[in-house]
Amino acid sequence: MMIVNSIQIFEKFGLNIEGRSALSILLFVVILWMTEAIPFSISGLLLILLIPAFGLTSFEETIYLGFGNSIIPFFIGIMIMSAALSKSGFTNRATLLILNKVGLKTSHLVLVFLVTGAFLSMWVTNMGVAAILLPLATEILENSNRKALDSNFGKALMISIAWGCGIGGMGTPVGNGANVLAVGFLSKLADININFIDWMKYGVPAMMLLLPVSWFILIKTFPLEVEELHMSKKYIENKLYNLGPLKSKEKKILLIYIVTIFLWLTSPLIKILYGISLPIQGIAVFAAITIFLPYIEILEWREANEVVNWGAIVLIAGSLSLGEMLFKTGCAQWIAGTFLGGIGSFPTVIQLALLVTLVLIFKIGFASNTASGLVIIPIVIVLAQEIGLDVWLLTGPATFAISLAFITVPSSPTNIIPYAAGYFSIKDFAFSGIPMSIAGVVILITIFYFLV
């Protein structure tokens, strides 16, 4: 009887059998992600089997929708470039150079870790940046005799790593797995092509506003017990001295990255002036191939294979397939109308505030930005279409909010890296993260409301 009633309820609100199947798959995979019953990458493979098993489309079409999407080679290219930057030693050198210029004032060090993490995370995977910054922060704290959990400076410095990486992830389309999904879904579901410049018009201002606010919140939440570290800068200088001048691989990857970023930024202008289309996906793939060419050879394939997260690529492919099915079966429209349709009656500012807040609450239960993007982005696109709002006006802040995993440590793998060092507790993270999340909501609303 309960099953019959459930079916009648679904039919009353316009969700057909295909839509109910897509919803069932979504709920099942959400449970898998929240419980981490199986690895995320395996859940991606499972999606590829479940979609045809439920009769939503053929197995071949499922594979095409996922692995055939241009986002997949784009993501592979980004990860290979990120691996090359890290393996060449350039990111480590850049971080040491920045720290060497800052001095030993504790408040300045917290700010520098925030800014460095944010800048690097615009181009390198967040977890990779956190892994680079963690040993430097640990060494600073150990050499200055800061004790784990007792030092406010230790808490602020370690949390700044997690926050900086999350904030920087908003700056470019390549800064976060959810950003990559958003670009793909906007193109496929709404025929909106967001290029690098389009994204950075909103991502960079949001990042620049969030960084000083996050620094202020950290040093006020955790009043630093010492103004300046009474220690020598020798260990940073010694590390730089031991590195020596820029090595050949560092010069090569730096040049490739500069050319790649230049092409990303100027591709809209090149199309206008010369009629040549340079998709950001193609530029990323070309740059990744260049890394392995004779006489360049920044990476061996074995090294790339060790660093590139192939499981994340499988997860994204499965996510893209399910996202398409949610849209095609009407399930995304049903979810948007049933649970979020009511916000259409509110003023635009309130709509944005409710949406970003809901995303931040939703993120508490998810440890994957990519998984969060899969669930949130197609629904938000449909919601914007249903209530007649600019699709980017809602999708942009919702996607940016996915990067703001400030309240719980498990809500992002990047948070776990500095947490593992033991200098702050889960309570410390939440205590500072709640006001930061409120600030994030206000800043994202301000950016998108006035710019869009």
Image (cartoon, rainbow, N blue to C red):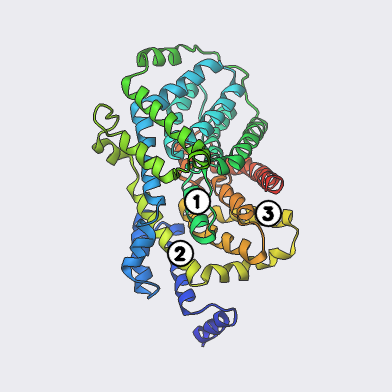
Image point 54% across, 77% down: which residue? 15
The answer to whether residue 38 of the structure is visible from this angle is no
- Mark 3 residue element: helix
Residue nearer the viewer, 248 or 5: 248
212 to the left or right of 286? right
Q: Is residue 428 above or below residue 215?
A: below
- Mark 2 residue element: helix
User: Which residue is disc 3 drawn over?
Assistant: 352
Which comes sooner in the sequence, label 2 or label 3? 2
Callout 2–callout 1 Cβ contact below 8 Å: no
Q: Amino acid at mark 2?
A: Glu
Q: Nearer the viewer, mark 1 or mark 3?
A: 1
Q: Is residue 158 above or below residue 438?
A: above
User: Which residue is disc 2 drawn over?
Assistant: 324
The span from disc 2 to disc 3 (Cα, nearest Å) is: 25 Å
User: Which of the numbered marks, if any, corresponds to residue 241?
Assistant: none
Image point 61% across, 50% down: which residue? 397
Residue 165: x and y, percent? Answer: 51, 37
Residue 108: x and y, percent? Answer: 60, 22
The span from disc 2 to disc 1 (Cα, nearest Å) is: 14 Å
Q: Is residue 405 above or below residue 4?
A: above
- Mark 1 residue element: helix
User: Which residue is disc 1 drawn over?
Assistant: 183
The answer to whether residue 400 of the structure is visible from this angle is yes
Q: How many numbered marks, from 0 up?
A: 3
Callout 1–callout 3 Cβ contact below 8 Å: no
Q: Quadrant of residue 213?
A: top right
Image point 41% across, 51% down: which residue? 71
Which comes sooner in the sequence, label 1 or label 3? 1
Which comes sooner in the sequence, label 2 or label 1? 1
